[in-house]
Amino acid sequence: MSNVESTQLLVSVTHRLFFSLVVLFSLALVTAIFLADSRHVILVVVITSGLIGGFVGLQRRLKELTIADLQLISTSWIYTCLSPLVGGILALLLYVLFLSGLLSGDIFPRFVAEEIPQVGFSSIFNQHGESYKDYAKLVFWCFVAGFSEHFVTDVISRFEGEAMKTLQKSSVVQSIQQDATADTKKEVD
């Protein structure tokens, strides 16, 4: 494929990405306006930040993609939107990690429960940032989740590794306890 054809593919994909971004951002903006007074507006902000991060990340990687990948993206709306949609999902997962306190520190947002505690899954929506800075941090990190999919998947892998260590320690402790119980029974018999 010639440089001219390659450049035309890049332009075609860039136009597709721009159009998709405008459509998805417009839908998110309209949704946020309708939910402005709702506690669910934060979900729209989280997912939209991840989507935009996904679009920017994909745009940044365009020159590294193979011609076959560029052709696929230039002819398929699904492939055009796939990376940004994954970014939105990862941003939502990151938000859950922040709410749970599993991912915390000075550079991450902090959330506190509403004054009227609720029980059940809906209580996840009764959280708010401690200050405006926490919302700014949330938007930034959700953008990063979409921009660099590896960031969230690496965090997940870290938690997976820690969970495996905990399970192994738990299995060893249970095995020791079972052996001790068996030894005690043998002594009693």
Image (cartoon, rainbow, N blue to C red):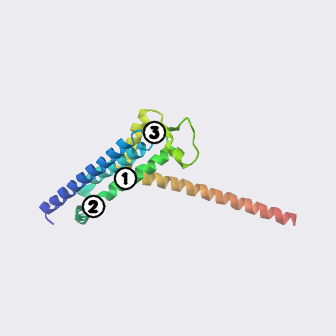
| Extreme residue toward the front, this view | 34
Spatial CA distance of label 1 from label 3 is 19 Å
Location of residue 119 by image quarter = top right
User: Which labelled disc corresponds to residue 109?
Assistant: 3
> In which quadrant of the rendered image does the N terminus lie?
bottom left
Spatial CA distance of label 1 from label 2 is 16 Å
Which residue is tagged 1? 87
Is 69 situated above or below 45? Answer: below
Of circles 3 and 2, the one toward us is: 2
Q: Amino acid at mark 1?
A: Gly
Location of residue 134 by image quarter = top left
Which residue is tagged 2? 77
Contact check, label 1 and label 2, Cβ < 8 Å:
no
Residue 100 visible = no
User: Which labelled disc corresponds to residue 164?
Assistant: none
Secondary structure of the residue carrying tag 1 is helix
Q: Residue at coordinates 30% horizontally, 62% vertically from top-left?
A: 78
Mark 2 or mark 3, which is nearer the start of the sequence? Answer: 2
Contact check, label 3 and label 2, Cβ < 8 Å:
no
Q: Amino acid at mark 3?
A: Pro
Rendered location of residue 2, percent (x, y)? 13, 64
Contact check, label 1 and label 3, Cβ < 8 Å:
no
> In which quadrant of the rendered image does the C terminus lie?
bottom right
